Image (tube, grey):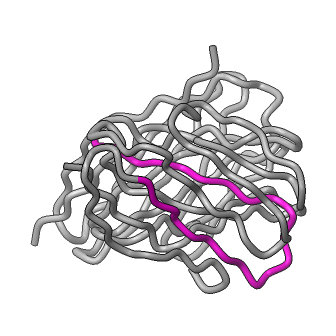
Amino acid sequence: NAGVTQTPKFQVLKTGQSMTLQCAQDMNHEYMSWYRQDPGMGLRLIHYSVGAGITDQGEVPNGYNVSRSTTEDFPLRLLSAAPSQTSVYFCAIRTTLTGELFFGEGSRLTVL
Amino acid sequence: GEDVEQSLFLSVREGDSSVINCTYTDSSSTYLYWYKQEPGAGLQLLTYIFSNMDMKQDQRLTVLLNKKDKHLSLRIADTQTGDSAIYFCAEGKAGTALIFGKGTTLSVSS
């Protein structure tokens, strides 16, 4: 997972609170993405970006915002946390040659 | 719609071979991937196969691709307890997001 850094690793929020999950890469890849992983649901794409200034929605974007002002950073914002957003969140970058994803170590979020 | 299907669980004894199966739907997928996730960790790429290949071998891992049936398998020879993890199959092509299966939990008993 070297090259993709996620912070924080653990977070507990109350319903209605907002927070930002940070993702930073030092591999200079254009494509960055956020997934959430839930038991029995596998990985679901929240938002992705194909380069600075460009973002797009994935499969489950509601309740989340993203921005991509630099190539290195791709923060994920929860505007008003809900218990349904309790999950493990993974940031990933994608290589252009073989299209594989490199994942960060994950951020475990609990919303009470 | 697009969907990648995997069986949810596989249990094997140490030293046996494990075969994890995956069915994908998009015949235009360029690459097919296998990822491994250990408890509390992120996903790590195990191997991938290009769509014009039938087989790829990498040490104890063998990937078989049947494009006609859209079937992908991962064989782990001489399975060890350290191979216990969740294995995800994924398909992808340029310009689109990877599509993941729900994962197969491999349990290896000694």
Identify the residue at horizontal 84%, vertical 70% (top origin): A70
Q: Quadrant of the C terminus of chain B?
A: bottom left
Dominant secondary structure of the residues highlighted in magenta in the image: strand
Is residue B2 found inside the magenta-colored segment of the image?
Answer: no
Is residue A89 placed above or below B15 in the rendered structure? above
Q: Is residue A20 above or below residue A84?
A: below
Nearest the viewer among A64 and B23 is A64
- Name the residue at 89% across, 55% down: A53
View extreme (left): residue: B110
At horizontal 19% and vertical 51% (from top left) the residue drawn is B11
On the image, the x and y values in percent for residue B91 come to 67, 41
Can residue A24 be found in the magenta stretch? yes
Q: Which residues are magenta?
A: A18-39
Residue A103 location in percent, x, y? 58, 67
Choose between B85 and A52: the one closer to the eye.
Answer: A52
Q: Is residue B73 or residue A47 the one in the foreground? A: A47
Q: Residue B16: x percent and y percent?
A: 26, 63
* Residue A22 falls left or right of residue B95: left
